[in-house]
Image: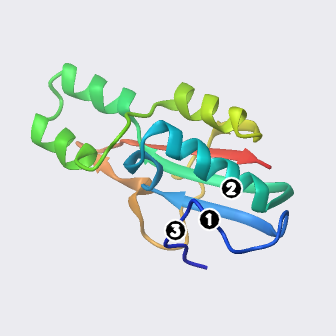
Amino acid sequence: MTINHPNKLYVPDKSVDFIYSCYLLHKHPKEKILEILKEWKRAIKDGGQLYISVPDYFLLSDKYLKSKCKIEEVNRVLNESKIFLDFLMVQRLLVQSGFYAVKRFDVERNPPKKEDMSLYEIGGQIISLNVEAYG
């Protein structure tokens, strides 16, 4: 199912087993992200899985500061960002929205079924933050 308006899912409460979001959340301000996550929490079944992929601001900053990439590469990734996210911020937002067991997800070990930004690399290093949580 493709969702064009992630802040409102037209599904019954606790009716979804799995939600996957790739490079979407960082395009919204923090308040909107909380609204989206709370809507996803409403829709997801107890114990349902949520996977999120966003640019990892910590990795991008570190890579840039160590001069391992050009600012143009960072700008290309963060161009549409309304908020810069790292693991601690994503974890905080997920827990605040009611999700639990938040942890990083290894996409190299479990790649997505379709090619997407979760494996985006700069200089041979994945710069995506991939997170798993449960509803």
Residue type, numbered disc 2: Glu
> Which element carries disc 2, helix, strand or loop?
helix
Q: Which residue is mark 1?
A: 8
Coordinates of residue 70 in the picture (x, y in percent): 11, 35
Residue type, numbered disc 3: His
Kindly indicate the quadrant of the structure image that contains residue 124. top left
Q: Nearer the viewer, residue 123 or 25?
A: 25
Considering every residue shown, the one lying at the far bottom of the view is 1
What crowding class fits label 1: few (fewer than 14 Cα within 10 Å), some (14-19), or many (20 or more)? some
What crowding class fits label 2: few (fewer than 14 Cα within 10 Å), some (14-19), or many (20 or more)? some
Considering every residue shown, the one lying at the far top of the view is 65
Q: Is residue 10 left or right of residue 66?
A: right
State the residue at coordinates (68%, 55%): 39
Kindly indicate the quadrant of the structure image that contains residue 63. top left
Q: Which mark is residue 39?
A: 2
Report if residue 92 is visible in the image.
yes
Kindly indicate the quadrant of the structure image that contains residue 12. bottom right
Q: Which residue is mark 3?
A: 5
C-beta proximity under 8 Å, tags 1 and 3: yes
Residue type, numbered disc 1: Lys
State the residue at coordinates (38%, 27%): 58
Q: CA distance from mark 1 to mark 2?
A: 6 Å
